[in-house]
């Protein structure tokens, strides 16, 4: 577990509470500024300790805008468009990662690795200044009056935070959705960490080739799958208030056998298409499931809900999964160890289907 993810998990609940009680645009600008400065400072690191500290500070910035941005977007757009909006937001992750590898690699090649951190960090200060100029709409501006009940807004920050977390723990649809998300993140984290090594060790593909090919697949399927899933979720919201959960659950259930084929089939003509199809299905749930999370709770506790989700999915998901696969690989083999990944995908999909079938307020309204 890196310093970044530790700080990110710990700081997320703090910014979640602040995001539900204070100016979200100011906190967003602060988060982007911290992220940018910390990234640039990594280029000045003179030891492992200073590099570790800089990377850990990046986690503070990411916790700020990672928790507040979804809550802010929910107040910019009505519920019937949130799947697509969140899809665009989360599709920026694979696109940004790809640009980071390309631009960072070029800067590293021509100017050195330190300058790569400066190039990544300094422009963020401009974005931080722009974030301060964003409009912070009233919480619930795009929601109907019969949505989920609000929390204890108006109380002290500490009291409101305690009331919000207590309400979230009692919110069964929300809890089920986050638990399914944790199983999903368990699988995603293990796939991201182990797939290149798996392709090298069990399929005989050179490491560099495996990394580049799998990385390219993730970028392309991440963009296409994420946007397609958001659009599908919004379309079927006309049919069911639980559409975001249904879509997330069904595409994730479809991803489970595809992931199994991708990891078990010995022929390239089979496992490469299976990897592409599985990644498309896995990414398709990103927009809908995050839309479901913000719709399942009061507008006055959305940042807190996102923060608790972030903490939970990492604590139970991609923090332990790479190590667990490694332990199983040492005990058995990597080829056998990775077979727990499609099982985790299946569990995540089943939990989401169950949550949808129970009639939770996945569309942000009480069940009929």
Image: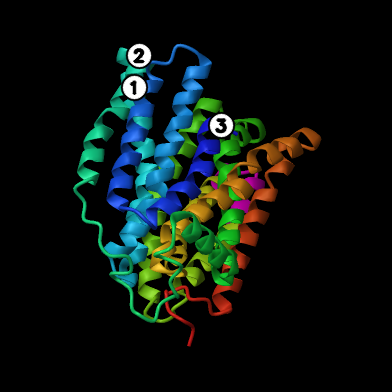
Choose the circle earlier in sequence order: 3 or 1.
3
Magenta span? 258-269
Q: Relative to 101, does residue 309 appear above or below in the rendering?
A: below
Q: Is residue 39 in sight in this rendering?
A: yes
- To which residue does mark 3 refer? 2
Q: Nearer the viewer, residue 16 or 162?
A: 162
Say whether residue 285 is visible: no
Is residue 342 positioned above or below 98 on the image? below
Q: Are marks 2 and 1 in contact (CB under 8 Å)?
A: yes
Closer to the eye: label 2 or 3? 3
Give the quadrant of the N terminus: top right
The tag on residue 116 is: 1
The reply to whether callout 2 and callout 3 are in contact (CB within 8 Å) is no
| Circle 3 SS class | loop
Residue assigned mark 2: 112
> Whole-percent x and y of residue 109?
34, 16
Quadrant in the rendering for residue 149:
bottom left
């Amino acid at each position: 577990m890196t310093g970044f993810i530790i700080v990110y998990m710990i700081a997320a609940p703090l910014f979640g509470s602040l995001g539900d009680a204070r100016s979200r645009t100011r906190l967003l600008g602060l988060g982007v500024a911290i992220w940018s400065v910390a990234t640039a400072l990594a280029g000045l690191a003179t030891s492992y300790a200073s590099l570790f500290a800089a990377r850990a500070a990046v986690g503070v910035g990411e916790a700020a805008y990672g928790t507040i941005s979804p809550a802010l977007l929910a107040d910019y757009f009505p519920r019937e468009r949130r799947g697509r909006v969140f899809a665009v937001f989360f599709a920026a992750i694979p696109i940004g990662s790809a640009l980071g590898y390309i631009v960072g690699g070029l800067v590293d090649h021509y100017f050195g690795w330190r300058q790569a951190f400066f190039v990544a960090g300094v422009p963020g200060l401009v974005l931080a200044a722009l974030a301060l100029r964003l409009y912070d709409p009233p919480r619930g501006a795009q929601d109907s009056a019969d949505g989920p009940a609000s929390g204890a807004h108006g109380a002290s920050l500490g009291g409101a935070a305690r009331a919000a977390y207590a309400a979230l723990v009692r919110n069964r649809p929300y809890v089920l959705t986050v638990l399914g998300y944790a199983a999903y993140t368990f699988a995603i984290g293990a796939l991201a960490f182990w797939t290149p090594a798996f392709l090298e060790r069990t399929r005989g593909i050179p490491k560099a080739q495996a990394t580049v090919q799998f990385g390219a697949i993730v970028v392309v399927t991440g963009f296409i799958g994420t946007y397609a899933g958001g659009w599908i979720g919004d379309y079927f919201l006309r049919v069911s208030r639980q559409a975001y959960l249904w879509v997330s659950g069904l595409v994730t259930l479809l991803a489970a056998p595809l992931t199994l084929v991708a990891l078990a089939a010995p022929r390239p003509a089979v496992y490469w298409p299976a990897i592409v199809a599985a990644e498309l299905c896995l990414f398709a749930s990103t927009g809908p499931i995050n839309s479901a999370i913000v719709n399942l709770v009061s507008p006055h506790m959305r940042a807190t809900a996102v923060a608790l989700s972030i903490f939970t999915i990492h604590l139970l998901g991609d923090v332990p999964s790479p190590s667990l696969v490694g332990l199983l690989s040492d005990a058995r083999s990597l080829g056998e160890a990775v077979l727990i990944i499609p099982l985790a995908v299946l569990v995540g999909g089943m939990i989401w289907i169950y949550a949808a079938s129970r009639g939770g307020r996945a569309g942000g309204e009480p069940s009929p």
